Amino acid sequence: MDKRILPVIAALCWLVCSGNAFAQNKVVNAGDVKKVETAKGQVKIVTTNAFADITVYDEGMIRVRMDKQEPGDDFSYAVIAKPSAITANIKEDAGSITITTSLLQARISKKPFSVAFYTADGRLLNEDEKGLTTSWVGTVVTTYKKLQEGERFLGLGEKNGNLDRAGTAYTNWNSDVFGYRADQDPLYSTIPFYIGVHHGLNYGIFFDNSYQSDFNFGASNNRFSSFGARGGEMNYYFIYAPDVAGLIKAYTGLTGRMHMPPLWSLGYQQNRYSYYPDTEVLRIAQTLREKKIPADGITLDIHYMDAYKLFTWNKERFPDPAGMTAKLAGMGFKVTVINDPGIKVEKGYESYENGVKENVFIKYADGELYAGQVWPGWCHFADFTGERGRNWWKAQMKGYVNNGVAGFWNDMNEIATWGQKMPDNVLFDFEGHGATHQQAHNVYALEMNRASYEGARSLMNKRPFLLTRAGYAGLQRYTAIWTGDNRSEDDHMLAGVRLLNSLGLSGVAFTGMDIGGFTGNPTVPLYARWMQIGAFIPYYRNHTAVNTKSAEPWTFGEEVMEVSRNYINLRYRLLPYIYSAFYEASATGMPVMRTLAIDYTNDQKIYNTRYQQEYLFGPAFLVAPFESTKEYGEVYFPGGKWYDLYTDELQEGQQSRVIPLNLHKLPVYVKGGSIVTMQTLVQSTSERPADTLFVHLYRGDSSNTVTYYEDDGETYDYEKGVYYKRIISYDKQQLVFEKPLGNYTSKFGNIKLILHGFDGLRQVKVNGSVQLPVSLSINFLDPVSRFDPQGGYTAPDMCNVLAVALKNSADRIVLEF
């Protein structure tokens, strides 16, 4: 080569590279609309720099899909619904395109391209920030939305911070964050769905893009909110409903709802990192029974395995796993075991050898198997984003099921490795589409949970319990989730409450946190308060780390054991109410644990940081958590009447009140008009309660309807109609039990109606016949006395109420007051 041409080539290379660098730093907007094609329920648009598909998904849902090239394969791990066959009115003129359904209207401006959403009657819900709209910086795509006056933002899944996200920003990248701060972001899971609230209106946006994504709700600016991702398409679903509950229902209709969980998983669970050997596990179970502390589950952490190798048992610690689980089953306990995705690279290890043979592990771009370090050492990882990898995993689970395991706890599935930096050039199947780690990272845990759920269900032929640390939108179809490695601190306890409330807003109903905190040692008052709150969260698990003090209820002294037992007892007596709340979650997506923003969205006081931890447990109970160090707390009561759970003292709503706090009682109130179903105390769900269902009715000024639900709590027969479902409605002077539906016989032959707030009531008509109510004194905390370290046992608070005995007839029952 002529050496004189080398400087010319170098200069050309510099120009090309500089041009590429400039392109990477240049902001490319969608530009003006150049071409429009309309079809039934869909508009295809070509702009100066992009392609857009606008699709009507439902009367209240419109999808916006954009890219710099024509959109490719339409694939999602999160979305399981298809567009509805509805008729939308689509009109076009020189300046705009309008799409109208019975609930929602999208107005698309042509110069430049931008989208605004309105209610059917013309009220503005949400609009692009016109100067910014949707744009690209290299591969990063972002949509900018104009901030509305006073706009609040809710949800976004497992995110720390205040209930109202306004003024903050978040990143979605599933991360292993041991002992995370109470303000840390990101955490373990990704659910890119949020709710906007302004001017008495509410909408939802689900951004279905699994790359690392960023959400800005007016942080460091007063102009826009935005959402974007480091790669892939701009692909979001705009959802409108008249209320927040409707938004959650629509979102979970799009991404799926939970199956009914096994009844035992709603009982108290005892865990530690780690219980071993098997004699220690049995000792814990026996102590719970001896001390009359109801419980249903014991969880085994990583020390049950042989050198941390998945699908193995340490033969010295657990020589007979099947025998141990059988003994525990005889005592009313189910066993959950931890599963990590890493398979140790070790010759002779069956799962490793088989995984290599079946070609199920993720690889680098050059075809070499990826290896990362976790507990067992260097590990390979199954590719759950392909059917081959999932089927292999399902087959590996057979040994667990054969050994009597009933619960599967998927941990370290962010994917977590020592060093926390999986290379971007690791490749995944992605259902045949192919993807790098950048795109597959956030959905890896979702598909691990899918494989575990489907495998356990097919092998067990009954409901498994699944728990995960990480996931993506739609995780509720397969698993419960807990908030990971929290700390034994008051701010973590309250942050945990907010995290669970946010997850509930984001379609996940079965949630929990490590009661007492995972890292560190809680104080005596903190442990007591956390155990009380635990009775009113969906997944009630006590858990602590290695090298911490034991954290079983009896390890904090007699007084705290008594307090803990009281609230665990209350939890078990409330199981009919809790199970019915889970049924509602499976049917509508409505969470069991509900921030006040769901029912009281436009009450500005609920967003005050003093009250933002308050929540409803199911539709009836208002729970007011406070730090364990406080002697007084201020409770805000939203609209309605509220009864003190323990004394029936009546409190009018829309006002706040300072109350004294103590170690023995968590502030809990019951909304007027509520219908609460309870049973007699049992020590586990394997024990049948007495024949009477207790129905507590709290007098109120507004009507109320609930669905009472039963099934066998174990199988999937309920999917074939084998359930007992009964609508119960209250309207001031009347309570009606509608005829039950389904082919399951209730375990309760009798009903005892307990009337709260009906002072002076002389008679009740039951289907037209007069029945005289009887006086009754009840105490919601068991046992009938409460421990006081200064004076021994003291008399508890009692509620004086009226009761009416009924036969649980299959006919319609009408009571008139």
Image (cartoon, grey):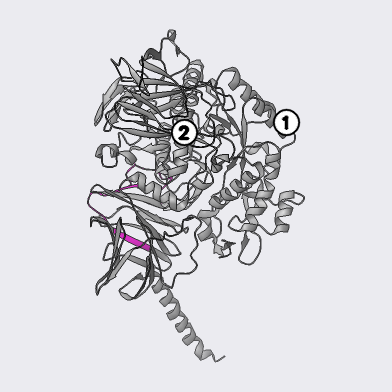
User: Seen from this angle, which residue lies furthest right?
Assistant: 348
Reading the image, the residue beneath label 1 is 323
Question: Callout 2, which amino acid?
Answer: Pro
Q: Is residue 603 above or below residue 534?
A: below
Q: Residue at x 65, y 29 (%)?
A: 329
Could you say whether the residue bearing mark 2 is in a helix, strand or loop?
Answer: loop
Viewer-side residue, 99 vs 478 = 99
The answer, for residue 101, to whether it is visible in the render is yes
Question: Residue 489's spot in the image, x, y percent?
Answer: 44, 32
Q: Residue at x 50, y 25 (%)?
A: 572
Question: Residue 204's spot in the image, x, y percent?
Answer: 35, 52
Question: Residue 242's spot in the image, x, y percent?
Answer: 30, 48
Reading the image, the residue beneath label 2 is 740
Q: Nearer the viewer, mark 1 or mark 2?
A: 2
Could you say whether the residue bearing mark 1 is in a helix, strand or loop?
Answer: helix
Q: Which residues are magenta?
A: 142-170
**CA distance separating discs 1 and 2:** 41 Å
User: How many numbered dots are placed on residues in this image?
Assistant: 2
- Quadrant hosting residue 623: top left
Question: Residue 794's spot in the image, x, y percent?
Answer: 42, 9
Question: Callout 1, which amino acid?
Answer: Gly
Q: Is residue 220 above or below residue 459?
A: below
Viewer-side residue, 593 vs 256 = 256
Q: Residue at x 34, y 65 (%)?
A: 134
User: Seen from this angle, which residue lies furthest top?
Assistant: 791
Q: Is residue 467 above or below residue 148?
A: above
Q: Is residue 780 above or below residue 607?
A: above
